Amino acid sequence: MLKSRKKLNGYRIFDIVNTALVVLITLIILYPLYFCVIASFSDPHEVSLGHTFFFIKGFNTEAWTNVLKEKRLWMGYRNTIYYTLGSTAYNLILHIPLGYALTKKYLPFRNFFSMYFFATMYVGGGLIPCYLINKSLGLINNPLVMMIGATGCYHMIIIRNFFSSSIDTQIYEAAYIDGASEGQTFFKIAIPLAKPIIAVEALYYIVGAWNNYYTALIYLYKEKLKPLQGVLRDILINNSEIHLNGFETADEVEALMRKAYLAQSMKYSVIIVACIPLFLLYPFIQKYFTKGVMIGAVKG
Amino acid sequence: MKTNIKSLLKQMYRCRLLYLMILLGFVATFIFAYLPLWGIVVAFKDYSSRAGIWGSEWVGLKHFKRFLEYPYFSTILINTIRINVTCLIINFPLVIIFSLMLNEMKSQKLKRICQQITYMPYFISTVVVASMAILMLNRTGLINLIIAKFGGQPTDLMSEPGAFPFIYALTDTWTGLGWGTIIYLASLSGVSLELIEAARIDGAGRFRIIWHVNLPHLKPTIMTLLILNMGSMLSVGFEKVLLLQTPLNSSTSEVISTYSYQVGLVQQQLSYSSAIGLFNNVINVLFILGANKLSKKLTDVGLF
């Protein structure tokens, strides 16, 4: 009797400690973002003294007003929105019909096509060969480079698995018997049933395009073509200066110090500005992304 | 035979719309994935833009020799491996432990909230993650403020070569800890409750149940992910390294891919750079084959 009670206590303690640790880890992961928010709204000097670990101190929007006036940031936003829309449309038009067609067992040479797409998962040209091909296609400094590209095998697999596992083939057969053409079954039956996977994929492409920095680094050199991520790198990492009002004649030490603190605070605001679309989309993203991971893992 | 071909053609004609659906993907993949494969030949040539890929002169293995004789060859090779090993040692077990912890949580609601919060950093762009790391780690950043609070001496961690692999690995922890649990949690939901109940009746404590029931259940998943990790031992998140790199930490942060980028696109030595890229790819394939074989021998789990 005593022994089993001991065991029960052990179980309870385990649960309490475990839950506490998970919550602690969660808070630690959340903290850097939280710190950016409070630091961006606090008096820059207080931030530099370490007085803003948990709460805003000396509420101040100077950093924000300067950041929101920054033209480059808005230009980057605009470019990225274009690139994201283009890339998402292109990828959906490419992948959804492709994944659908490859589920059709009666399609001649179906296995050849599957192999053709899968092979790209294991062999790739690498940076320079890709660069040379894209260069010869005129894609250097061309916004199209941010939108188009090869088939993503991972997405193809997810979509194909969805069509073959979630939609009963009998539905198609019934439609064929009723005299529906291949096009009608695709647009009238498959697409409406595939809405969940279209949402999953659309979000994948949106997040991918929004965060894409690599392509622009390699192919886009013109300032006015830079996507948001490129602008962020210039401001946050390469420290190219943001124009500050009221500091044109700053030459006293104190003013210079204030300017340095302010620059730091502005970086926190820039980070928040860059993350806002993500936070807004996040409820959808985390719901659909985990779904996508699961559909992809079914095949493994 | 003739009727066979005829019926095949007939079937293909019937499927013409399906072929149309494949067409865009087929062409795009040909241009963006297969043509670059053909472009690999520049690694064996002295590429000049005037002569083009085909017209340039063959030079055999010259560029590969040059890379092997590069004085910092071993340094960048070791740097690449050091960053990967640091990530593997720190993050691989952490994700498994965190999954097991989440799995043991009684309150489903709290569990879901913790999952949602820890997944979030995964969606933040590499540029922002790297910037946050730099902001937090520089002389006036958060980490140094905390160090100062405890009476320590602030140091600029970004220019500390020894810290680089850890900084890299910890940014990976931040973005990947929660996200990495998805696949393990899915697998853990398949653990048989009867088995756990039986272990409990036999008097096993929570740790022993986790150790003898949950963990063995995860073994295939762990091995698969480990093999995939080993296979990418020589490829490192190029973007993040490039963003976190400073002249002061380059003695540990220069890796094969950043070097290849530097000589290729910045200095325009295209042939040399593609030779480095090809070398890297070949080694990667060897690594994954080796890891696969080793895993099959030790645990009977393999990818192929």
Image (cartoon, rainbow, N blue to C red):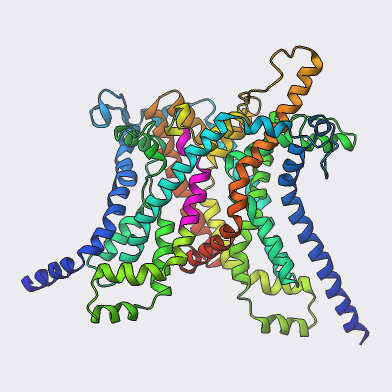
In the image, residue A237 lies in the stretch drawn in magenta:
no
In the image, residue A207 lies in the stretch drawn in magenta:
yes
- Relative to B244, residue B23 above or below: below
B42 horizontally vs A235: left or right: left
Residue A258 visible, this orientation = yes
B5 horizontally vs A176: left or right: left
Pick the front one: A47 or B181: A47
Quadrant the N terminus of chain A occupies: bottom right
> Residue placed at 58% from the left, 54% from the top?
A281
> Residue placed at 9% from the left, 70% from the top?
B6
Q: Residue furthest left?
A: B2
When asked about the image quadrant of residue B130, the answer is top right
Q: Residue furthest bottom?
A: A1
- Examine the residues drawn in magenta and state their main secondary structure: helix
Q: How many marks?
A: 0
Pick the front one: A152 or A251: A251
- Relative to A132, residue B22 above or below: below
- Relative to A119, residue B44 above or below: above
Pick the front one: B9 or A286: A286
When asked about the image quadrant of residue B185, the answer is bottom right
- x and y, in percent, of residue B153 in the image: 85, 30
> Residue placed at 37% from the left, 29% from the top?
B271
- x and y, in percent, of residue B109 in the image: 72, 69
Q: Which residues are magenta?
A: A202-217
Q: Residue furthest right?
A: A2
- Relative to B159, residue A31 above or below: below
